[in-house]
Image (tube, rainbow, N blue to C red):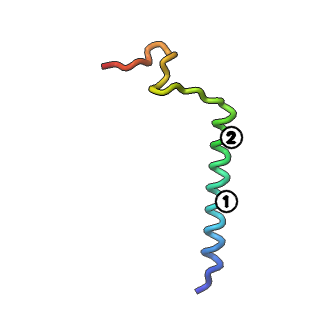
Amino acid sequence: MNAEPLLLLALDLTGTFAFGLNGALTAVRAARLDIPPGGRGDVPGSGDRR
């Protein structure tokens, strides 16, 4: 059995994952998310409804 196709597939999937993770981290950094623990308490009507 030739292992080359499996190696290329693994490298391709690893690169795709790294590219997606980098994009996600860049988006979070660009958005400068500041979400307080417990939710968004600064938005009217977003409190716990019990």
Q: Is residue 1 above or below residue 24?
A: below
Residue at position x 34%, y 19% in the image: 49
Residue at position x 65%, y 31% in the image: 31
Reading the chain from its start, which is encountered first: label 1 or label 2? 1
Which corner quadrant of the image does residue 2 belong to? Answer: bottom right
- Name of the residue lying farthest toward the front: 37
The residue wearing badge 1 is 15
Amino acid residing under circle 1: Gly
Badge 2: few (under 14), some or many (20 or more) residues near its Cα, within 10 Å?
few
Residue 43, horizontal then vertical, whole percent:
50, 16
Residue at position x 47%, y 13% in the image: 44
Secondary structure of residue under mark 2: helix
Residue 22, horizontal then vertical, whole percent:
67, 47
Q: Quadrant of the C terminus?
A: top left
Please give the count of numbered marks on the rendered protein: 2
Amino acid residing under circle 2: Thr
- Name of the residue lying farthest toward the top: 44
The residue wearing badge 2 is 26
Which corner quadrant of the image does residue 9 belong to? Answer: bottom right
Residue at position x 61%, y 80% in the image: 3
Q: Is residue 22 above or below residue 27?
A: below
Mark 2 and mark 1 in contact (Cβ < 8 Å)?
no
Secondary structure of residue under mark 1: helix
Which sits in the foreground, 24 or 34?
34
- Name of the residue lying farthest toward the bottom: 1
- The residues tagged by marks 1 and 2 sit, at their Cα atoms, a distance apart of 16 Å
Indicate which disc residue 41 carries.
Answer: none
